[in-house]
């Protein structure tokens, strides 16, 4: 089955992908500043008029779920609408590059509610066979994901009454999201890769306090991983990555396994697309370092031959 590279996406990866806004000029927000978004303005006025505090979104969600279920349902609907509306810009983005830079042995696990990585996967599959792209999973649900009793996909691909919306894992202590069949299936994917990845990259994921139970679970899984020897942290700058790395020291690992990056372009993924694992511990391994202003055509001219090599090894016809 080959060695595996697991990439875990957090809110910072979406912000890095659309720093100037999405296709329609809309921006993404972290949970901490979500209520600053204009689409929540009337909702915020409504709950503040009822003496609910809006400084802490996690506390607000828990309080509304217990005391004001209709308001909670309204908030969840607004959150879903907000994240479902985000669209990738027309130009070649970091997430497009990420999808093309990993192999079918690898996985991208997104804790984000937006579906930008699904959009990237869809449009990159027009250039590369899906058999040569990584697996995607969404353990916190996804605003555009739908599923049935056989598989899951995106509302951007299918329509109809036979599909069930993915739940969104809102920060509510009383809800057991893992009892949902879709969320449970996504955690199974993450469980497998967390135990079997030779390299793990955290991209824009900071391990917030609302994810404490998830982090404990990941800690337990990583303890069973006997082959991982590199964990890379990508954040908005080197200082931020170092701070995230300090928090991830909860995972039982050697100190020299942690590699904070100044940004995406300093990561192994950016420097060695589709060959990230070959570059581990091999100081003589060299591939072209790609400029962040490259177009899709320019990038494909570099990774296309690598994909052809992989297809020959797997005996997959293009």
Image (cartoon, rainbow, N blue to C red):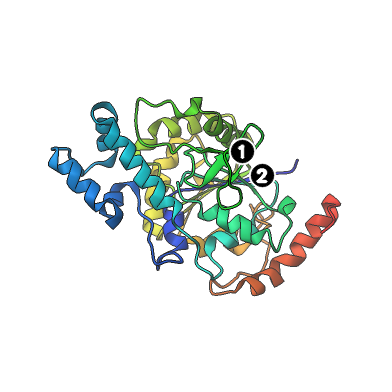
Where is residue 248 shown, x and y percent of the image? Answer: 43, 41
**Viewed as shown, does residue 221 lie left or right of 24?**
right
The numbered dot on residue 157 is none
Q: Is residue 213 above or below residue 305?
A: above
Cβ atoms under marks 1 and 2 closer than 8 Å: yes
Q: Is residue 262 visible?
A: no
Q: Earlier in the sequence, mark 1 or mark 2?
A: 2
Q: Quadrant of residue 285?
A: bottom right
The residue drawn where x is 56% and y is 56% is 119
Q: Secondary structure at mark 2?
A: loop
The residue drawn where x is 29% and y is 38% is 58
The residue drawn where x is 74% and y is 43% is 2
**Viewed as shown, does residue 313 lie left or right of 145?**
right
Q: Dot 2 surroundings within 10 Å: few (below 14), some, or many (20 or more)?
A: many
Q: Please tell me which residue lies in front, 195 or 131.
A: 131
Where is residue 270 shown, x and y percent of the image? Answer: 58, 62
Quarter of the image that includes the N terminus: top right
Q: Quadrant of residue 137?
A: top right
Q: Secondary structure at mark 1?
A: helix
The numbered dot on residue 4 is 2
- Find disc 1 in the rendering and name its residue: 193
**Viewed as shown, does residue 36 lie left or right of 79?**
left
Q: How many marks on residues?
A: 2
Tell me how far mark 1 sits from mark 2, CA to CA.
7 Å
**Viewed as shown, does residue 58 lie left or right of 21?**
left
Where is residue 207 shown, x and y percent of the image? Answer: 40, 42
Q: Is residue 176 above or below residue 11?
A: above
Quarter of the image that includes the C terminus: bottom right
In the picture as drawn, the residue positioned furthest to the front comes out as: 161
């Amino acid at each position: 089955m080959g060695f595996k590279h697991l990439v875990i996406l957090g809110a910072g990866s979406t912000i890095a992908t659309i720093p100037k806004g999405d296709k329609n000029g809309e921006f993404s927000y972290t949970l901490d500043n979500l209520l600053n978004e204009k689409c929540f303005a009337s909702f915020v006025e409504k709950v503040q008029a009822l003496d609910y505090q809006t400084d802490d979104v996690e506390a607000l969600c828990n309080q509304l779920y217990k005391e004001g279920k209709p308001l909670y349902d309204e908030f969840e609907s607004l959150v879903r609408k907000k994240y479902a509306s985000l669209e990738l810009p027309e130009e070649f983005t970091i997430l497009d590059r990420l999808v093309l830079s990993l192999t079918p042995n690898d996985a991208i696990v997104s804790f984000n509610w937006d579906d930008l990585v699904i959009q990237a996967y869809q449009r990159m599959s027009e250039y590369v066979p899906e058999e040569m792209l990584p697996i995607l999973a969404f353990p916190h649900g996804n605003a555009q994901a739908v599923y049935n009793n056989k598989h899951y996909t995106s509302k951007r691909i299918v329509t109809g009454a036979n599909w069930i919306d993915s739940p969104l894992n809102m920060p509510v202590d009383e809800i057991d999201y893992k009892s949902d069949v879709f969320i449970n299936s996504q955690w199974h994917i993450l469980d497998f890769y967390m135990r079997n990845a030779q390299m793990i990259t955290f991209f824009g994921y900071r391990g917030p306090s609302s994810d404490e139970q998830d982090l404990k679970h990941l800690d337990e899984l990583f303890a069973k991983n006997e082959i991982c020897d590199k964990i890379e942290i990508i954040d908005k700058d080197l200082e931020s990555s170092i701070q995230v790395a300090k928090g991830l020291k909860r995972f039982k690992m050697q100190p020299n396994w942690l590699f904070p990056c100044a940004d995406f372009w300093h990561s192994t993924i950016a420097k060695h697309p589709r060959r990230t694992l070959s570059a581990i511990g091999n100081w003589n391994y060299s591939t072209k370092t790609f400029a962040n202003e490259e177009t899709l055509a320019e990038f494909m001219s570099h990774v296309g031959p690598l994909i052809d090599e992989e297809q020959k090894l797997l005996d997959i016809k293009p």
